[in-house]
Each structure stands twice: as structure tokens, then as C-alpha cells.
């Protein structure tokens, strides 16, 4: 997992940038119809899933199955959003909730595995916790207005995007430090 993240830090960076673009778009045009929001979410989930899956396939070493699963779930969520954008708000909320829950759990698992290699892996844990908290809000307030949901989703995407970008640069810097010191990332001592 550490080798995958260290080599594919750019994919994490792109995922963060995409999340921020999604957040900005949702805030700038809050009166978009739910169908357009579904399509925007579909694009985000699809591209996010493709980058996660691509990073796992290109750099498959060790335990890469978690990243493959995360990528496949993102791609599936994106495709469903494109195929049936006219579905009810409830179905859309459940789709997002399932995606956020699975992604959150997988990010926490990845962070636990990454703790031996990367200081401050708490950013990935925080991303996972944010995903799970978002699901809790969707369950507690399923009848929230569309605008409240749009702003809630935009806030989540913005925070998640910023944390992902910070984590990408931390992973990249750790990789650079090890290249300069001549050490192998796979032989790092545990914390």
C-alpha cells in the first residue's frame, strides 16, 4: 500500500482537485436541478474511481485490493448516476451514502496500513471519518431540502479535497526524502 501511494501521489492530488472543483461548482450554481447535480456527482465519482483503480493497476504491489475495490465502487456509483439521473432524491441520497460509507471505511483501513510509513496519516483517517459523518447526516436528515443537501455535499467535497491535496504532497515529499537518502520505502522501520 505504501508503494502504491508513494508512486501514485499525483492521483491523490487529482482526486483532491476534482473534489474542490465539484464543491465550487455546487456553491456557485445552487439552483441547478437535482438531475444536473446527479450528473456532476456521477462525473466526480467516475473519475475518482478511475484514478483509484488506475493507480492500483499501474502500481499493483502488495495489498492493492482495497484500492481496486474503492475504484470499482466509485466507477459503479458514477455509472449509475449517468444511466438513471431521473431517479428519486431518496435513491440518489442512498447511492451517495453507500459510496461515502464504503470510501470512508476503506480510507481508514488504508491509513491504518500506512501508519508504518507515513507520519501524519491522520489526514487519510480524517477523510474517512468525514465520509462516515456525512452518511450519518444523510440518515438523520433524509428530508433536508435540496439546497441544504447541495451545500452540505459541497462542504464535504471541499474539506475532503483539501485534505487529499495536503496528503498527496506529504506522500510525495516522503518519497523524495527517501530517494535522496537512498533508503527503500518498503524497508522503513515502523513508528
Image (spheres, helix red, strand yellow):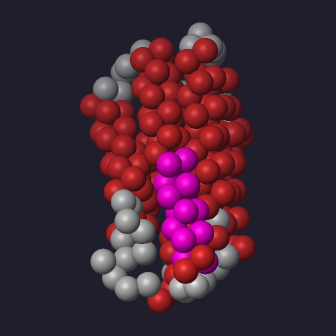
Q: Is residue 64 visible?
A: no
Q: Nearer the viewer, residue 149 or 178?
A: 178
Examine the structure image and report whether residue 72 is included in the region drawn in magenta.
no
Examine the structure image and report whether residue 165 is included in the region drawn in magenta.
yes
The majority secondary structure of the magenta stretch comes to: helix
Q: Residue at x 37, y 19 (%)?
A: 144
Magenta range: 164-179
Q: Eyeballing the image, is 124 above or below 83?
A: below
The x, y position of residue 45, in whole percent, is 62, 45
The x, y position of residue 78, in whole percent, is 65, 45
Q: Residue furthest bottom?
A: 187
Q: Is residue 53 visible?
A: yes
Res. 189 image quadrant: bottom left
Q: Residue at x 32, y 41 (%)?
A: 133
The x, y position of residue 169, in whole percent, is 55, 55
- Side (left or right) of 71 relative to 103: right
Q: Nearer the viewer, residue 154 or 33?
A: 154
Q: Residue at x 61, y 51 (%)?
A: 13
Q: Eyeballing the image, is 124 above or below 188?
A: above
Res. 44 image quadrant: top right
Amino acid at each position: 500500500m505504501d508503494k502504491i501511494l508513494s508512486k501514485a501521489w499525483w492521483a491523490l492530488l487529482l482526486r483532491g482537485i476534482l473534489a474542490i472543483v465539484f464543491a465550487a461548482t455546487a456553491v456557485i450554481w445552487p439552483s441547478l436541478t437535482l438531475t444536473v447535480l446527479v450528473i456532476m456527482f456521477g462525473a466526480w465519482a467516475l473519475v475518482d474511481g478511475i484514478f483509484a483503480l488506475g493507480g492500483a493497476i499501474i502500481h499493483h504491489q502488495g495489498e492493492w485490493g482495497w484500492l481496486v475495490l474503492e475504484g470499482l465502487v466509485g466507477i459503479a456509483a458514477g455509472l449509475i448516476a449517468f444511466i438513471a439521473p431521473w431517479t428519486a432524491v431518496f435513491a440518489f441520497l442512498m447511492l451517495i451514502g453507500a459510496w461515502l460509507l464504503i470510501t470512508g471505511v476503506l480510507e481508514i483501513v488504508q491509513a491504518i496500513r500506512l501508519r508504518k510509513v507515513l507520519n501524519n496519516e491522520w489526514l487519510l483517517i480524517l477523510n474517512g471519518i468525514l465520509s462516515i459523518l456525512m452518511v450519518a447526516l444523510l440518515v438523520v436528515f433524509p428530508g433536508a431540502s435540496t439546497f441544504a443537501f447541495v451545500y452540505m455535499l459541497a462542504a464535504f467535497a471541499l474539506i475532503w479535497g483539501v485534505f487529499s491535496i495536503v496528503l498527496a504532497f506529504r506522500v510525495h515529499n516522503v518519497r523524495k526524502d527517501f530517494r535522496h537518502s537512498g533508503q527503500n520505502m518498503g524497508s522503513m522501520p515502523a513508528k
